[in-house]
C-alpha cells in the first residue's frame, strides 16, 4: 500500500520523531548531531592539511614552513581524533539505551490508554504494524535518527566540498598550451557530469526505495509470520500441542510460502534490473572521479596550482558528489518514512475517550456500597451483537452474589462493565446512586479486587506478585496466601516470599501449576483488601480438595466484603445470598438457590443438567 504525504508534513513528522526520541533517551539526538558533524568535518580538515603539506613538499620545501604544517596536521588530526572518540562514545552509550527505551514509548501509551482500546484488535494490529515496519526495513523512529545523521553529514560534506573545490575551477593555468582549461567549458562539462552521476544514483535508488516501500505490506506480513511461527516452537504454552499434534505440518509450509524464501518477491527484486541499475549508478561515480583526476592533473601541469592540491581536489570533488547524492537520498527517505511515522503517531495520539470523572469514591468505614445496573446494554467495539442487553440488577455490600449462566451469556462482560473497563452504550451503572462515570477512575478501581478467569502472574517474586509492588507488608502477604490456601506450597518455596515465579528472569524460578497460580491470584485479590471481591471462575483450575478448602473458608476470606462470584458449578453457588442467572446477555432470573431450583426456568435447567452427573 502506498501512502503519500507532502514533504512539509514529512519534515514535521521527522522533527516530532526526534523530539520523541529526545524525551525517552535524552542524550541521543544531540550526540547524534554533534557526532555526525565532527565525523563529516574531519576528512575535509585532513584533506586540506595534507594538501598544504604536499604543496610545500613538492614546491619550495621550506623547512620552517614545513614543520609548521606537520605540527598543524598532527595537532588537528589528534584533536579531531579525541573529539571524535569522545562524541562516538557519548553517542554509542546513548544509542545502547535507545532500543529498550524506544519500546517504552509504545508501552507507556498502552498503560495509559482506555482499556477498550487496549482490547481493540485494530489497535493491536497497529502496534504490530509499527514493530514490523521497523524490523523489516527500519522505517519509523529508527529512520528519523538515521535521517538526522545522514542529513548533517551530507550538508557538512557539501559545504566543505564546495569550499575545497572552488579554487580548482577558479585557479587559472599559466601555460598557454593548457589555456583552454581556463574557459567555462571544462568546468561546465565536469559539473554536468557530476550532476548526471548524482541524478542517475538518486533516481535509481529512489525507484528501488519505492519498490521496497510498495512491498512493505508483503514484507511486514512475512516478517510477522516468521516472528510468530519461530517463537511458537519454544513457547511453553504451545510446545505440548505442537509436539502432540505434529503442528509443524501446518507451520512449516506457511513459513515456506513466506515472501522471503529464495525465488520469492524480495529475492526477485534484489536480483532484478532496478537493483542492478542502482549498483551500476554507484559505479558511475568512479568514472566521475577519474575525470576530476584528469582535470586537476592537467591544471596542475599547466601551473594553476601545485601537485599537492590535486589530492585535495580529487578527494573533495568525489566526496562532494557522494554527499549531494546522500542528501537527495535522505530527503527521499524523510518522505518515504513519513507514512510509517504517521502509523506511530496514530497509535500515540489515540485519545482517551472515556469520560473521566472527579468525584472521590468514599472510603466508607461501614463499607456501605450499593450498586445498581439500570437498563444496561453493551456491545464490544467493532461487533454487532449485544453482549449485554437491558440488564437491571441491584446489590449491596456484604451480600454474596453469584452469577451463573452458560458460556458466552455475558457474565464476564457484566464484571468488566462494573469495573469500568468499558462504558455501556445504553443505560447506567450507579454506585450509591451516582453514575460511576462521575467518579475518579483510579479511585473507583480501588474498590474492586478481581480474579479474572485469564489472570496472569508476573515473572517476579511471589511476594511482589501478591502485593502488586516491590515493597510490601510481608506479614499481610503471608496471611493472604494462607487464606487463599497456599500455606503448604509457600513452605515448599525455596526462598519463601522472595522466590521468583517462572524461569523468564531467574534460572531457579519456580514454575507454578495452574491451581497454585490461581491461589496466588486469589491471595493478590485478598491483599488488596477492597470492599468488593470478584471471583470469575475462581476454582476452575483447582483440584476438588483445594476447591472444598476454598469454599470452606470462603466466609472467612470474604468477611464483610461484597463478593461477586461467577461459576459454572452451580453447587458452589449455593452458599451465596443471591444468584443472578444470565442467558444470552440478559438477567433472566434472580433469587436464592432454594427459590430458583423450585421455579421453572434456566436455573433449574442448568441445575438438573449438572446434577445428573452427581446423583447416580
Ligand atoms: P461469559 O463470561 O458468560 O462466558 P462473556 O461475557 O465473556 O461470557 O461474553 C459475552 C459475549 O461477548 C460472547 O458472545 C463473547 O463472544 C463476546 N465477547 C467477549 N469478549 C469479547 C471481546 N473482547 N470482543 C468481542 N466480543 C467479546
Image (spheres, rainbow, N blue to C red):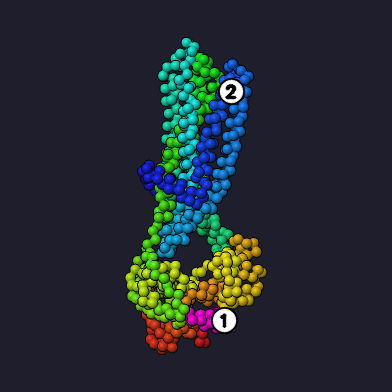
Other residues around mark 2 within 10 Å, as few (<14) / some (14–19) / many (≥20): many
Query: Which residues make up the magenta segment?
Result: 544-565
Name the dominant secondary structure of the magenta segment.
helix
Q: Secondary structure at mark 1?
A: helix
Image position of 222 with respect to 498: above or below: above
On the rendered structure, is 498 left or right of 396? right
At 38% from the left and 65% from the top, the residue drawn is 356
Is residue 220 visible in the rendered image? The answer is no
Q: Which residue is mark 1?
A: 549
Residue 117: x and y in percent read 41, 61
Residue 85: x and y in percent read 59, 39
Q: Which residue is mark 2?
A: 53
Residue 529: x and y in percent read 51, 75
Q: Is residue 549 on the magenta stretch?
A: yes
Viewer-side residue, 594 vs 616: 594
At 51% from the left and 56% from the top, the residue drawn is 228
Specify the label residue 4 is tagged with: none
The residue furthest top is: 176
Amino acid at each position: 500500500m502506498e501512502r503519500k504525504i507532502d514533504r512539509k508534513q514529512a519534515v514535521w513528522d521527522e522533527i516530532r520523531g526526534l523530539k520523541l526520541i529526545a524525551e525517552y533517551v535524552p542524550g541521543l539526538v544531540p550526540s547524534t548531531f554533534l557526532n555526525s558533524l565532527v565525523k563529516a568535518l574531519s576528512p575535509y580538515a585532513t584533506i586540506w592539511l595534507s594538501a598544504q603539506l604536499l604543496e610545500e613538499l613538492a614546491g619550495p620545501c621550506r623547512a620552517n614552513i614545513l614543520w609548521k604544517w606537520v605540527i598543524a596536521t598532527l595537532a588537528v588530526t589528534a584533536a579531531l581524533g579525541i573529539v571524535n572518540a569522545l562524541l562516538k562514545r557519548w553517542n554509542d552509550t546513548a544509542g545502547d539505551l535507545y532500543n529498550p527505551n524506544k519500546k517504552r514509548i509504545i508501552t507507556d501509551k498502552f498503560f495509559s490508554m482506555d482499556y477498550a482500546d487496549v482490547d481493540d484488535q485494530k489497535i493491536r494490529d497497529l502496534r504490530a504494524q509499527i514493530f514490523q515496519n521497523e524490523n523489516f526495513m527500519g522505517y519509523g523512529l529508527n529512520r528519523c535518527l538515521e535521517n538526522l545523521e545522514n542529513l548533517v553529514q551530507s550538508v557538512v560534506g557539501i559545504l566543505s566540498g564546495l569550499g575545497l573545490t572552488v579554487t580548482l575551477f577558479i585557479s587559472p593555468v599559466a601555460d598557454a598550451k593548457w589555456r583552454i582549461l581556463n574557459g567555462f567549458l571544462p568546468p561546465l562539462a565536469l559539473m554536468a557530469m557530476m550532476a548526471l552521476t548524482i541524478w542517475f544514483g538518486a533516481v535509481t535508488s529512489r525507484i528501488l526505495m519505492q519498490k521496497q516501500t510498495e512491498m512493505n505490506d508483503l514484507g511486514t506480513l512475512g516478517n510477522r509470520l516468521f516472528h510468530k511461527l519461530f517463537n511458537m516452537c519454544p513457547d511453553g504454552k504451545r510446545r505440548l500441542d505442537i509436539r502432540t499434534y505434529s503442528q509443524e505440518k501446518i507451520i512449516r509450509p506457511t513459513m515456506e510460502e513466506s515472501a522471503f524464501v529464495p525465488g520469492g518477491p524480495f529475492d526477485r527484486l534484489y536480483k532484478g534490473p532496478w537493483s542492478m541499475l542502482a549498483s551500476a549508478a554507484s559505479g558511475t561515480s568512479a568514472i566521475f572521479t577519474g575525470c576530476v583526476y584528469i582535470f586537476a592533473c592537467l591544471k596542475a601541469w599547466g601551473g594553476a596550482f601545485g601537485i599537492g592540491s590535486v589530492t585535495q581536489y580529487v578527494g573533495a570533488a568525489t566526496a562532494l558528489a557522494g554527499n549531494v547524492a546522500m542528501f537527495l537520498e535522505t530527503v527521499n527517505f524523510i518522505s518515504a518514512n513519513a507514512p510509517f511515522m504517521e502509523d506511530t503517531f496514530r497509535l500515540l495520539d489515540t485519545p482517551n475517550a472515556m469520560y473521566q470523572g472527579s468525584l472521590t469514591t468514599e472510603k466508607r468505614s461501614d463499607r456501605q456500597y450499593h450498586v445498581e445496573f439500570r437498563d444496561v446494554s453493551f456491545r464490544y467495539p467493532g461487533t454487532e451483537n449485544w453482549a449485554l442487553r437491558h440488564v437491571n440488577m441491584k446489590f449491596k455490600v456484604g451480600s454474596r452474589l453469584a452469577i451463573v449462566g452458560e458460556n458466552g451469556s455475558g457474565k464476564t462482560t457484566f464484571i468488566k462493565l462494573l469495573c469500568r473497563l468499558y462504558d455501556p452504550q445504553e443505560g447506567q451503572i450507579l454506585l450509591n446512586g451516582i453514575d460511576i462515570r462521575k467518579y475518579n477512575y483510579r479511585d473507583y478501581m480501588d474498590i474492586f479486587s478481581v480474579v479474572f478467569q485469564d489472570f496472569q502472574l508476573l515473572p517476579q517474586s511471589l511476594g511482589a506478585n501478591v502485593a502488586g509492588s516491590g515493597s510490601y507488608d510481608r506479614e499481610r502477604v503471608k496471611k493472604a496466601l494462607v487464606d487463599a490456601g497456599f500455606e503448604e506450597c509457600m513452605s515448599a518455596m525455596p526462598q519463601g516470599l522472595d522466590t521468583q515465579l517462572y524461569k523468564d528472569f531467574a534460572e531457579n524460578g519456580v514454575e507454578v501449576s495452574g491451581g497454585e497460580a490461581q491461589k496466588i491470584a486469589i491471595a493478590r485479590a485478598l491483599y488488596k483488601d477492597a470492599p468488593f471481591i470478584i471471583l470469575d471462575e475462581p476454582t476452575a483450575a483447582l483440584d476438588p480438595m483445594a476447591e472444598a478448602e476454598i469454599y470452606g473458608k470462603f466466609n472467612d476470606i470474604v468477611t464483610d466484603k461484597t463478593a461477586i462470584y461467577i461459576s459454572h458449578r452451580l453447587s458452589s453457588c449455593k452458599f451465596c445470598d443471591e444468584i443472578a442467572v444470565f442467558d444470552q446477555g440478559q438477567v433472566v432470573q434472580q433469587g436464592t438457590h432454594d427459590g430458583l431450583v423450585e421455579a421453572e426456568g434456566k436455573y433449574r435447567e442448568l441445575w438438573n443438567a449438572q446434577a445428573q452427573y452427581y446423583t447416580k
